[in-house]
Image: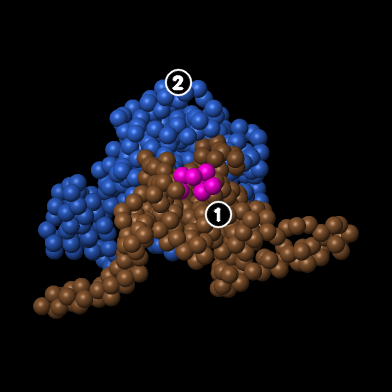
Amino acid sequence: MSANGKDLIIRLDKVCMAYGGHQVLFDVSLDVGKREFLTILGPSGCGKTTILRLLGGFETPTSGEIYFEGQPFSSVPPYKRPINTVFQKYSLFSHLNVFENIAFGLRIRKQPEGVIKEKVIRMLKLVNLKGYEKRSVHSLSGGQQQRVAIARALVNEPKVLLLDEPLGALDLYLRKEMQLELKNMQTSLGITFIYVTHDQEEALTMSDTVVVMNQGRILQKGTPEEIYNEPKNVFISRFIGESNIFEGIMPQDGEVVFCGKKFPCVDKGFSRDEPVYVLIRPEDVQTVEPHSGLLKGKVQSVVFKGVHYEMIVRENGHQWMIHSTKSLKVGEEIGLYFTTEDIHVMKRNGAEP
Amino acid sequence: MKTVASRETRNLLQYPYLLWISLFIVVPLVLVLWYSFTTPTPTGSYEFSISNYRRFFEPVYLRVMSRSILLAIEATLICLALGYPAAMIMVRLGSKWRNTVLLLLVLPMWINFLLRTYSWMALLGRQGVLNQFLQWMGLPPQYLLYSRGAVLIGMVYNFLPFMILPLYTSLSKIGKEQIEAAEDLGANRFDVFRRVIFPLSLPGILTGTTMVFMPAVSTFVISALLGGGQDMLIGNLIEQQFLSTGDWHFGSALSILMMVIILISMAFVSLTDKGKTFEEGNLW
């Protein structure tokens, strides 16, 4: 987004981080735009929480610099940063009730009592906890505690809100509801959200921009559509959504060979006869009559998944996963069909599928 | 069948303990109560009387009581002032050093209480280590021993670990996350202490205060050895009634009164703390 002319708010410039000789971030560079909802997605231990801790001011980068609105930021202590965090474990103050938890930041800033009361009540309304002012935080459910944590951060009207897997402890229904609520809040308040999660669906649902990380490095940055439809490598395609991945060869641009056949494709920029990986999403494969398909196969298994059926089709030594709303019979001979746009060619980069 | 049998065994097992506490706690308490409400008659029998209690309200004895309480409060406050920073430093030490310091703190308790108090006589005495040091510096020797200050030093020295340990326990329970959350919300180090660390350590303060105040208000050894019997404390007064004056009736009444005063003050301390939900760290 920042590249599209939006104002930058945070810039990470070749940030490295090591804890006691163990390096967790390698040359991480990242631009975050104002009012952007940016999600850092990656498996646990990939360094995503470390980035949040660096932004919150709880760690100082080993090398590189963080800029906030153009100013170097690394040496600014946490309490002087216009950034608030919703912590993974909520970290509510156990000695304070709901009202005082939310009022904490305002009291530190010595706001008048009337202002505090008005703002806290407004926040409670926003997170749907009206009437919970006097409750002890121990008496709240996980979802309620989580909303208190969000209210406690948002009430300070930060320029940037950091969220560290805030929905991890919630059940599926509440999580979906909170995803919507968070996205609505972000849009209506116009605050930059930097959201860390290992849940790919969450990342795709809420974000303007998704950053995929693994082992301390940023692998790809893009809109949810770009990340899903054009993953840069096998790791990303496996991490986001289900995928069929085949070994293939690019004889030349616009042409790829896999599963023993040559197909036209839209991918360019490969050297002659370069070995590649080919990705086809399960929902992009259509099942047709055997004679009208591009490839022929035999249905091996059918599993009902709610919205769709997940079927495994054996095709000449390859296994295909297919998602379809119509069920087939096990043992049925079928044809597989997909369009040129459904074929995504990825460089090998030494990565195993 | 087996569970029933084991429950019976368990029930049997409590009798030695019940016997023990009734013999050594309940019976003596009842005796003390009986003594406190009786006076000997000329005929050699006893009659019910509240004169022992009335006698306590004579100014001499009231002064002894107020002196004891004041001294105990002073000792408790000094212990708190010394103990709180010590506990905070201990929490921040690495685990290796922390255990060493904890050991050093507990180590003196393996030596007899009396011996430790005697050693302060050797330190503070006319020919004691401190005075020899003062003379070596070319300063005149001071009368350090047998003073109110010496008693206070003795109390603080003996009871300081009882302040530090509960403080250390409650401070070490405060999670790093809560402190980081406070910093994140704009709290500098002072705000973090005032609004997070201190309120969360209140249970430890309460326990420590109780554990220092109670032995301090009732001590008679420290005031006898280091105070030289000049400033009589309630503990010394009771000891005197039992061992030298032989008035067990007045001594018993004094003991009961002191117990009541301690109970009231402790109840008051924990009442001021009510409304806050602490699951642990309380004595009551």
SS category of the residue bearing label 1: loop
Boundaries of the magenta span: B56-62
Percent position of residue A127, x then y:
34, 32
Q: Is residue B142 magenta?
A: no
Q: Could you say which is closer to the camera, residue A57 or residue B161?
A: B161
Q: Is residue B7 visible?
A: yes
Q: For this rendering, which residue is in front, A245 or B19? A: B19
A31 vs B237: above or below: above
The kind of residue on which mark 2 rests is Gly
Q: Chain of mark 1?
A: B
Residue B135 in the image, given as x and y percentages of width and height: 85, 62
Could you say which disc has been placed on residue A4 in the image?
none
Side of B53 relative to A320 (left or right): right
Q: Residue at x 58, y 70 (%)?
A: B114
For label 1, the residue is B233
Q: Colour of chain A?
A: blue
| Colouring of the image | by chain
Dominant secondary structure of the residues highlighted in magenta in the image? helix
Image position of A339 with respect to A311: above or below? above
Residue A57 location in percent, x, y? Answer: 58, 44
Q: Quadrant of residue A224?
A: top left
Figure chain in brown: B
The residue drawn where x is 13% and y is 75% is: B4
Q: In terms of secondary structure, where does tag 2 sit? A: helix
* Residue A256 appears in the figure: no
For label 2, the residue is: A114
Of B132 and A325, which appears nearest the observer?
Answer: B132
Q: Count the marks: how many?
A: 2
Mark 2 to mark 1: distance in Å? Answer: 52 Å
Q: Amino acid at mark 1?
A: Leu
Query: Seen in the image, is B121 located left or right of residue B250?
Result: right
